[in-house]
Image (cartoon, helix red, strand yellow):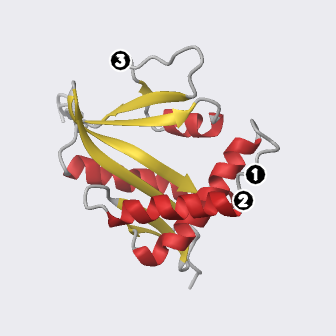
Amino acid sequence: MRPPTEAAALQVRAATHADLAAIAALHARARAAYHRARFPDAPFDAVAEHARWHDAWARVLDRDDTPALCAVRHHTVLGAASYRHRTDRQGPAVTLHQLHVDPAHWGTGVGRALHTACLDAWRTAGFSRAVLDVLWHNHRARAFYTGLGWRPDPDRRPAPDATHLTLTLDLAPRERPTPLPPPAGR
């Protein structure tokens, strides 16, 4: 029997307080990694940063209106996501607040698995639109979301000095193509 592949061993599930320390640590590492290119001397992985993200994720896990997911492989938390329902002038939507993957696991499918689990939950809940804000200088994240179909929100153009870009995703159910009729004479 062949050993399971890395992708097969990945599980996405609801995050719990038992995951808090691991989620906060990977969030701090991910944030440090994507900020270092722009701010090489800033202490993004300092003790204070870890405490900040620990407290932030503790608040998320305490809220009933902010579901949180984590991606786990071999009992190790590799990524986390959280989202919140909202209503704006276009109607009900869902906001992806956080999606972070431990930098050691970037490009391994962890982010895509978290994103897919979010999409499934959002569509099941009946949402037709999702939004998120991504850091303007985080080109890796922008490319990730663009590849998954997210587009700049036409109603929220960034200012010339903007630090974030608002993206939106249509969650309408995909139409199944109409099957072609069989060829005549068969």
- Crowd band around label 1 with a 10 angstrom C-alpha radius: few (<14), some (14–19), many (20+): few
Residue at image location 60% in from the left, 18% down from the top? 161
Residue at the disc numbered 3: 155
For the residues bearing labels 3 and 1, Cβ distance under 8 angstroms: no
Q: Provide the secondary structure element on which disc 2 rests.
A: loop
Q: Residues within 10 Å of mark 3 (few under 14, many from 20)?
A: few
Mark 2 sits on what residue? 46
Q: Mark 2 or mark 3, which has the lower sequence index?
A: 2
* Quadrant placement of the N terminus: bottom right
Horizontally, residue 84 falls left or right of residue 58, namely left
Q: CA distance from mark 1 to mark 2?
A: 5 Å
Count the marks. Answer: 3
- Residue 27 higher or lower than 37, as above or below: below
Question: Relative to 117, is 6 on the left or the right?
Answer: right
Circle 1 residue: 43
In this view, which residue lies farthest toward the bottom?
1
Closest to the observer: 129 or 90? 90
